[in-house]
Amino acid sequence: MPGIDECLLEAMALPGARGASLVDWTSGLALGTAGDSPVGDHETTAAETAELARAAAEFDSFAAGGQTFAGSAGSPAGAVGEPPVEDLIVTTRAGYHVLRFVATSFDSSVFLHLWLDRDTGNLALARIRLRDLAERLVLG
């Protein structure tokens, strides 16, 4: 079971990977980073992607199976430790940003962010691998 650094290194081994990070979406802080950042600063990227992740996790429209947002601010809908959204994909002219929510034994407020080159990246493979990494990731 990989820790944060090993997880990010595995993510960077994917075809077309340009950067990867593990981000806490409640605080917007990067818990670990690897590779490049789209804006040249991993902390800025973490804060910006956290806003997107927070919106998806907190809006009832994205809750699985019609579940409504439960709990206090920063608590995802659904069972404790179960993120309400599996992943988000943002496509830009030059690349893909894949945000994969990580289920945890606490409040599931973290996600993996992978930045892929659009020409050399494989989006389907990235989604499968990030799902596997998120399931095996050991936090703590």
Image (cartoon, rainbow, N blue to C red):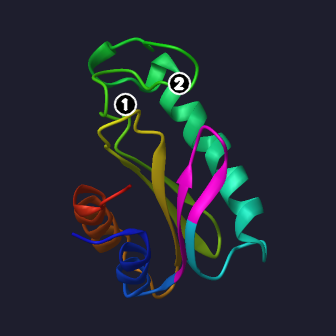
> Which residue is depicted at the point 39% across and 77% down?
11
Q: Which mark is residue 22?
A: none
Left/right of residue 59 with respect to residue 46 in the rendered view:
left
The C terminus lies in quadrant: bottom left
* Secondary structure character of the magenta stretch overall: strand
Residue 101 inside the magenta-drawn segment: no
- Work out whether residue 38 or residue 79 is closer to the camera in this orientation and state it: 79
> Which residue is depicted at the point 51% across and 85% down?
119
In magenta, the rendered stretch is 18-31
Q: Are marks 1 and 2 in contact (CB under 8 Å)?
A: no
Q: Residues within 10 Å of mark 1 (few under 14, many from 20)?
A: many
> Which residue is depicted at the point 28% across and 72% down?
2
> Which residue is depicted at the point 36% across and 73% down?
7
Q: Amino acid at mark 2?
A: Glu
Residue at the front extreme of this rendering = 140
- Percent x, y for residue 21? 54, 67
Q: Earlier in the sequence, mark 1 or mark 2?
A: 2
- Percent x, y for residue 34? 55, 80
> Which residue is under mark 2?
58
- Work out whether residue 111 or residue 94 is closer to the camera in this orientation and state it: 111
> Which residue is under mark 1?
84
Residue 28 inside the magenta-drawn segment: yes
